[in-house]
Image: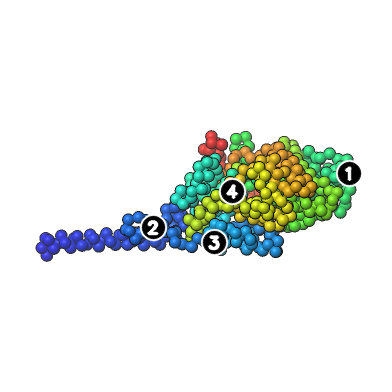
């Protein structure tokens, strides 16, 4: 072959090689699942790209896909049968019509939400969007590799939420794991910062000529007096009992604390023995419902409180479902006078009941979701104002605006037709003030009475600072792995200590928990948490 022929053949081979490379690159790109997850080697927003018809611009892999997403929600049992179900009701239909996105709701029981979501992820049936109030749980999902980073999705597809995040940069540290954004969230309104609270029957106190208790010892004494005066009563009920006990002693089992400059996990603190000890003492004295540990949906606690068979309620500070319970109590027992109770002090001082950190709900993206662009569009629609009717209802039907405050017209109608819809408003640009509570409530005497109680309970709930030594919890694979097992162990050990007699004390429970912590690798977790604290404390 002459030199010219050789050059021609060489050129043809080079052209073939270039074409083959382009085909391989295109095939790899089109083979991605488009979710931007770590499982296929992509970062969020680094979607597979395909050549467009014009041969120059890159085609968006999600353009043309059905605008269809699924999202979890908490099932609190608030949807009446004539309203439908959490999956199918007037508001789900409204969301689809107004947002232009085919949204499917996946309800999970409120009290077992994380367990239910874990099962869904393990079975491959988790929804596209999952949410929780607990940042540490989002960290666990990051560790498990079942959710994906979303920073580039926000940058590429969002307008409204991106703008909101730019205006609220203080949220970024809470949304960031391993240097990448894994969730969206919005600022909590004041009503949502206060979370847990205590209520007491002031009429029972007045009848017995007792003051409101201010210490743990006085709380026990008042509960005993209630039991003696009303033998058929259950003095203390509630659905946040263990969290209230933990908050009293500043020892939440799922939180890290600073003890003399050293990070220590809450369930391993000396004080945690006092938490379980108090719970055991109240149980053995017959001052709590013997079945409260299995009252997973809080039906027994609610029934005892609303029918006037309990004197102290450990639950929410007010509003929402707690409003309904107070209203039911006043209907069942017109002479009842439930009032908010300030948290009692222990030998360690006085702390507030649980108060939330600034972020509200954390919404994460399933790594296997098909259309993250549609998910971002849905979240943008919510924060643009889609959240407002879900929280307040329909103007002229459920509320009227007075000085820009949505005032309820009929609390019964609102509770039946709107209250549950707030679960769907996972991002919201909501700003509220304590004095709005009176304006928000209907004008009838009972609603205004409950609103005044809520104002008082909000003030009391925020009076004492909840002990949170660090603004947010560290999230490492090791720590998250330990917690997955330890949480179950703590529940089981606590139940044994409380119910199984004098052999099993609070100190016994603490030692068992510490042994399990060590067995699971707690020493390494302590070291990781301490290193994280030293590296980040300047920004706290």
Residue located 81% across and 40% down the image: 212
Q: Which residue is mark 3?
A: 102
Disc ID at residue 287 = none
Q: Which residue is mark 2?
A: 59
Q: Earlier in the sequence, mark 4 or mark 1?
A: 1
From the top left corner, tell me how far across and down residue 454 is, in percent: 73, 44
Disc ID at residue 207 = 1
Left/right placement of residue 290 relative to residue 405 reads: right
Tell me the element at label 1: helix
Return the residue nearer the eye: 117 or 82: 82
Tell me the element at label 3: strand
Quarter of the image containing the N terminus? bottom left
How far separated are the C-alphas under marks 2 and 1? 75 Å
Residue located 60% across and 59% down the image: 94
From the top left corner, tell me how far across and down residue 161 is, in percent: 52, 48
- Can residue 387 be seen in this snapshot? yes
Return the residue nearer the eye: 349 or 333: 333
> Is 437 drawn above or below residue 381 in the view shown?
above
- Mark 1 or 3, closer to the camera: 3
Is there CB contact under 8 Å for labels 2 and 4? no
How far separated are the C-alphas under marks 1 and 3? 57 Å
Choose top left, top right, bottom left or bottom right for residue 60.
Answer: bottom left
- Mark 2 or 1, closer to the camera: 2
Q: Residue furthest left?
A: 2
Return the residue nearer the eye: 115 or 332: 332
């Amino acid at each position: 072959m002459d030199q010219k022929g050789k050059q021609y053949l060489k050129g043809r081979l080079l052209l073939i090689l270039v074409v083959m490379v382009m085909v391989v690159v295109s095939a790899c790109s089109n083979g991605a699942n488009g979710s931007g997850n770590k499982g296929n080697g992509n970062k969020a927003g680094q979607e597979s790209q395909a050549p467009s018809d014009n041969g120059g611009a890159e085609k968006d892999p999600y353009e043309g896909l059905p605008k269809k997403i699924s999202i979890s929600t908490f099932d609190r049992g608030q949807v009446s049968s004539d309203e439908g179900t959490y999956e199918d009701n007037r508001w789900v239909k409204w969301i689809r019509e107004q947002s232009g996105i085919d949204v499917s709701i996946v309800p999970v029981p409120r009290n077992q939400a994380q367990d239910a979501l874990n099962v869904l992820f393990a079975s491959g049936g988790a929804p596209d969007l999952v949410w929780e109030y607990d940042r540490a749980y989002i960290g666990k999902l990051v560790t498990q590799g079942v959710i994906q980073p979303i920073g580039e999705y926000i940058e590429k597809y969002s307008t409204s939420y991106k703008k909101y995040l730019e205006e609220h940069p203080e949220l970024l540290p809470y949304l960031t794991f391993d240097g990448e954004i894994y969730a969206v969230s919005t600022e909590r309104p004041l009503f949502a910062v206060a979370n847990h609270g205590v209520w007491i029957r002031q009429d029972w106190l007045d009848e017995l000529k007792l003051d409101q208790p201010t210490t743990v010892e006085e709380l026990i004494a008042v509960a005993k007096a209630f039991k003696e005066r009303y033998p058929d009563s259950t003095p203390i009920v509630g659905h946040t009992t263990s969290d209230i006990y933990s908050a009293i002693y500043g020892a939440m089992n799922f939180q890290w604390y600073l003890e003399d400059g050293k990070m220590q996990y809450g369930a391993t603190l000396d004080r945690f023995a006092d938490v379980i000890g108090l719970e055991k003492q109240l149980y053995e004295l017959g001052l709590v419902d013997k079945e409260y540990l299995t009252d997973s949906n809080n039906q027994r606690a609610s029934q005892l409180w609303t029918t006037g068979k309990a004197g102290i309620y450990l639950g929410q500070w007010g509003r929402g479902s707690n409003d309904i319970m107070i209203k039911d109590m006043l209907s069942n027992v017109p002479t009842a006078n439930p009032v908010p109770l300030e948290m009692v002090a222990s030998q360690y001082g006085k702390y507030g009941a649980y108060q939330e950190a600034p972020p509200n709900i954390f919404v994460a993206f399933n790594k296997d979701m098909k259309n993250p662009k549609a998910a971002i569009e849905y979240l943008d629609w919510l924060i643009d104002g889609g959240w407002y009717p879900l929280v307040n209802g329909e103007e002229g039907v459920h509320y009227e605006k007075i000085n820009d405050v949505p005032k309820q017209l009929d609390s019964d109608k609102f509770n039946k037709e709107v209250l549950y819809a707030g679960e769907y408003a996972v991002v919201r640009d909501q700003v509220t003030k304590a004095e709005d509570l009176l304006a928000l409530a209907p004008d009838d005497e009972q609603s205004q009475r409950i609103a005044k109680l809520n104002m008082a309970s909000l003030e009391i709930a925020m009076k004492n600072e909840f002990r949170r030594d660090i603004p947010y919890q560290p999230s490492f694979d090791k720590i998250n792995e330990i917690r997955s097992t330890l949480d179950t162990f703590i529940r089981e050990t606590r139940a044994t200590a409380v119910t199984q007699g004098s052999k099993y004390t609070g100190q016994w429970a603490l030692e068992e928990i510490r042994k399990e912590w060590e067995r699971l690798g707690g020493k390494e977790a302590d070291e990781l948490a301490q290193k994280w604290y030293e590296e980040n404390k300047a920004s706290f």
